[in-house]
Image (cartoon, rainbow, N blue to C red):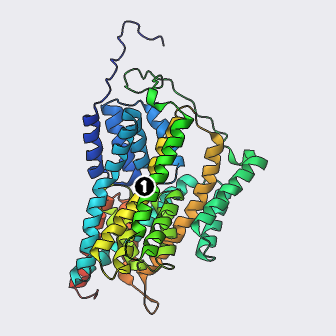
Amino acid sequence: MQPDLNTPAAAPVQKPGFKEAFLFWLKLGFISFGGPAGQIGIMHEFIVEQKKWISESRFLHALNYCMLLPGPEAQQLATYIGWLLHGVRGGLIAGILFVLPSVVILLGLSIVYVTYGSIPWVAALFYGLKPAVVAIVMLALIKIGKKALVSWLHYALALLSFVLIYFLDIPFPVIILGAIVMAVLMLWFYPSTLRSRNSEEVQVTDESGYYINTASVLPHTKFSWSKVAMKLAVAVVLWVIPFLLLGLLQDGSFWNKLSLFFTKAAFITFGGAYAVLPYVAQVTVEKFNWLSSYQMIDGLALGETTPGPLIMVLAFVGFMAGYNHFAGSLLMGTVGLLATTYFTFLPCFLFILVGAPIVERTHSNTSIKAVLSIVTAAVVGVILNLTVYFGKAVVIKEGLTIDYFSLAWIILSIIAMYRFKVGMITWIGVSALAGLVMYLVGYFQP
């Protein structure tokens, strides 16, 4: 079909003002419920479809890169797009505002939790929430597994990673490193085993109606080794200064341990929050004794009810670490939450502001995707470990007796959210009310 030469081309969209973009990122921080899929969907609808700030191909190109990174892909995608639109300050504003509302909300909820959590009716609300959280993790396992396990090799790797972390207590970073090494070796010696044989047909479309499209050349996106070196130096300084300042506080060794642990966690969060939580629980609960397994599940419940990335659960862990270590100090708990948030998200900005200029001049790399498929398969086994870990804590009570309400509510939650598509936030509310009912009828006694 020949194009109609009499049809005028779409008028080019003007560069969005910084204030307009700022207001959108601020709004996004308050409405970004529904996990990464929902958050990315909101950005796509507004930025690509409504405002036409960025074309579909550029949006997907940025998303593909963010999916390869450790950390929350939706937050990093916001940072990437903010950087495309307004340079470094745009990326910083987009990334910070994506998490700032959830930081404030989660801090308030954490203070309420430790202050009033021992009140019977409040404990009853969390009693109902715990089995719903287990169901949410199980559904995440099913959803990720369907996408990641595409061959017998992937199933075998998922099972192997579960055995290693659950039965042998092999740390999560070691499993991920081993998966990467294995994938590279397979790619070297048996490349046909990993590389997909499916070729995708690229549809050529007219993107002239977008501010940033395939033909756009943005001066600030050009790659420069001097800029990379400068950004790396700034990142190191931004990491060292708070690290040293926290070390000056009471019991500096505790703060050093917290800073180093969450920095390390930030670099290995391949697969999202559900993948790194088993590692965080394994270390902070069983090794450091910063919080209990029940408090870990309560933190996940709080994280599910707040906007922003689910990785914010780590901020709750940091709060409880400071609160418990310093004998119930709300101030130290607050410092712990803010420090954890800082060290968790600092690498996210580094990955985008340093890596994005490189990505802008590259195309999709099949080798990287092949390696990632192996890593993702291993992550599925780790998430299975998280499911078993939380499930045992919720269903099996002291004395190895079974909590039949929790077991039944897990099953009911899966049916409601998977079969009948009840919204997660809605079901969390229903579950909290169910816990309150169990308290009122005398079944649950804190």
Foreground pick, 435 / 80: 80
Residue at 76%, 47% (x, y): give it. Answer: 188
* Residue 283 located left or right of residue 366: left
At 58% from the left and 74% from the top, the residue drawn is 166
Q: Quadrant of residue 225?
A: top right
Per the image, label 1 sits on a secondary structure element best described as: helix
Q: Which residue is mark 1?
A: 345
| 233 to the left or right of 175 | left
Dot 1, crowdedness within 10 Å: few (<14), some or many (≥20)?
Answer: many
Which amino acid type corresponds to the residue marked 1 in the rendered image?
A: Phe
Q: Position of residue 38 (x, y in %)?
A: 36, 49
Q: Position of residue 265 (x, y in %)?
A: 50, 62
Q: Residue furthest front?
A: 248
Task: Point out residue 411 in the picture as x, y percentages from the top left corner.
Answer: 40, 72
How many labels, in total? 1
Res. 426 visible in picture? no
Quadrant the C terminus occupies: bottom left
Location of residue 296 by image quarter: bottom left
